[in-house]
Image: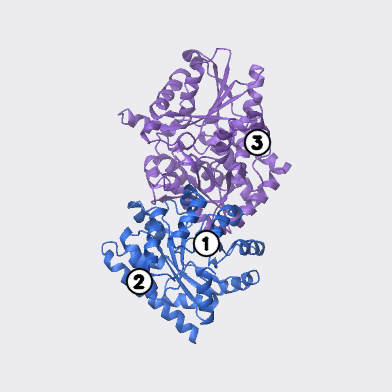
Amino acid sequence: MSRIQARFGELAEQQRKALIPYVTAGDPQPDVTVPVLHALVAAGADLIEIGVPFSDPMADGPVIQAACERALVHHVSLHDVLDMVREFRRTDAHTPVILMGYLNPIEVWGYQGFAEAAAAAGVDGVLTVDMPPEEADDLVSALHERSLDAIFLLSPTSSEERMRKISQSASGFIYYVSFTGVTGANRLDVDAVAKKLDVIRCHTELPLGVGFGIRDPESAARVAQVADAVVVGSALVGKVAGLVDRPGSIPAELAATVSAMRAAIDAQAVT
Amino acid sequence: MEQTTAAEAARLSDTLPDERGHFGPYGGQFVAETLMRPLDELNSAYRRYIKDPEFLAEFDSDLRHYVGRPSPLYLAERLSDEIGGARIYLKREDLNHTGAHKINNTVGQALLARRMGKRRVIAETGAGQHGVASATVAARFGMECVVYMGAEDIRRQAINVYRMRLLGAEVVPVESGSRTLKDALNEALRDWVTNVENTFYIIGTVAGPHPYPVMVRDFQAVIGREARAQVLEQTGRLPDALVACVGGGSNAIGLFYPFLGDREVAIYGIEAGGDGLETGRHAAPLCAGKSGVLHGNRTYLMEDVDGQITETHSISAGLDYPGVGPEHAWLKDSGRARYDVVTDSEALEAFHQLTRTEGIIPALESSHALAYTARLAAGMDRDKIIVVNLSGRGDKDIHTVADLEGIRV
């Protein structure tokens, strides 16, 4: 059983919802990332998404684009990201880690070599934003051979046929993009999300995470009512942007944001 | 990949791309999930209308009466004599409405957008030619138009920015990344993913996710169909060689495609060599790049060892792009077409040579094709024929050329 599957199993038993924070690796500088990951876990993160910096993040809004640019000033590569995961794993053997990014850095490395190195570093799942299942056969089989989960997106424009197809390629969980748009936009409509999740659940047993547009404890709690997991990205990365001249304070500041969301999600579960 | 024979490549070119847009290992649909449905809808509409006699008649009529086609095929005698080799024929896309080949494609896509009921069109632009061509068709069809353009390019191409605004388009400066064409493309994709329901994205070249490479090729292939008929009519035979510049590659595919089955016709695509391949300051993914995935397709890219897209350089803003259409990647690997580079200074020399000998001021993009043609023609006999795509006129580049020569216009 993968670490991701195990974690969702535990959460289901406890009737809790997963909180998945996202940070861009190496933002604003490489030595901040591992302390941030530990701080996020201490503040209540159940899984962690690490963004792999890319020069052309087409599906991201300005907040995460800027984070990629800050990391790339330091030439943070996919190899460096795996080094960060390896270091994180030295003291955290349990929290699932998902890499999220674009295909080209993986393409250039080679699918087999990347999958082997990612598994060895302690990565649990990989989400390549610009690779729909139609193009993903080779990468998915390379990931599965190394017991890595291939995480796929579904969106408001996905047909039921695509939901079926994607649930066949996906493992770990499915990431539902809450609106048509880029990361960091403010277009969340929880009722519409709930309706779509009901349809998706007809086609998959996998846990459903929801991301895009979750910016505060209130929206996190509302999404947690309808989803199995809540993904928070731009709200955290936007905090980092304001702290580039005080990098030492970033772990604690992000932890405070995540704790508040954690508390709101858990309070919702009790009521 | 394995080398295929030219004959096999020509045969395969009729069956490529496959139904998901692959030219061998290249092409495809590498986009976020949200864009898969609009791409499927676009593909269905394109496949339906590209065979629809009424649509094709309207397209042909617009090309004739609005764009001004057919464009002439012109024997450049003084240029040919000065070079002293093969006879050089210019396919005069510079004489089209708006001054470049770009309008062929924007007319086609705007007609498609109308049939799909989309009232808002968006486009990316580098030098501004595709942006102007998009704003032009939007004005004609009464559509809302938003053009994304790198902030750096906006500074370099002020006149085209004003032209687009006169035409009623909103020009949005893109401040991210290198603030050039690739970043404008990223921003246009972000707009499309946000406004999928009412928006049609007019991509300006034969790159991007399927069906754009094949659709733009089909709209631009009028160039090669006309050129083939014109050269047969004027000379009684096919040319020995075709030459076109390649940025994304739409004017080149437009010329090449109808000749792919004519195996005796050599095909040359010319990339921007910038300061020279050895300097690293160029925009030549086919000649000096590697395979990768960007902007929805697998193709040759300018990228570093980590897979980050690198900045490009060319004197010509229209060639200043780190990728290239997937069909060119396929034509290169198959050996059916050959790709080479021309530097900024060689292009500039060709710009002056054509202006001086023929009274035609070429775009700096097209000047790359002209410079290679001069090199090629010099080594060929006088009874040989080269057709070169004069893809655009040079009015937009006058300031760039004057600046380089220290002249204030």
Please say if B49 is above or below B242: below
Q: Secondary structure at mark 1?
A: loop
Measured Cα–Cα span from mark 2 to mark 1: 24 Å
Q: Which chain is blue?
A: A
Residue B387, numbered label: none
Give percent across and percent down for residue B361: 45, 26
**Which residue is under mark 1?**
A148
Residue A39 is tagged as 2
Q: Residues within 10 Å of mark 1 (few under 14, many from 20)?
A: many
Q: Is residue B326 above or below residue B201?
A: above
Q: Quadrant of residue B103?
A: top right
Left or right, B409 with respect to B5, comes to left
- The span from disc 3 to disc 1 (Cα, nearest Å) is 38 Å
Residue sitting at x 58%, y 59%:
B197
Colour given to chain B in the rendered image: purple
- The three-letter amino acid code for the residue at tag 3 is Ser
Q: Are the residues under marks 2 and 1 on the same chain?
A: yes
| Quarter location, residue A66 | bottom left
Q: Are marks 3 and 1 on the same chain?
A: no
Q: Residue B316: x percent and y percent? A: 42, 34
Res B13 label:
3
Asked whether the residues under marks 2 and 3 belong to the same chain, the reply is no
Q: Earlier in the sequence, mark 2 or mark 1?
A: 2
The quadrant of the picture occupied by the N terminus of chain B is top right
Question: In which quadrant will I find the C terminus of chain B?
Answer: top left
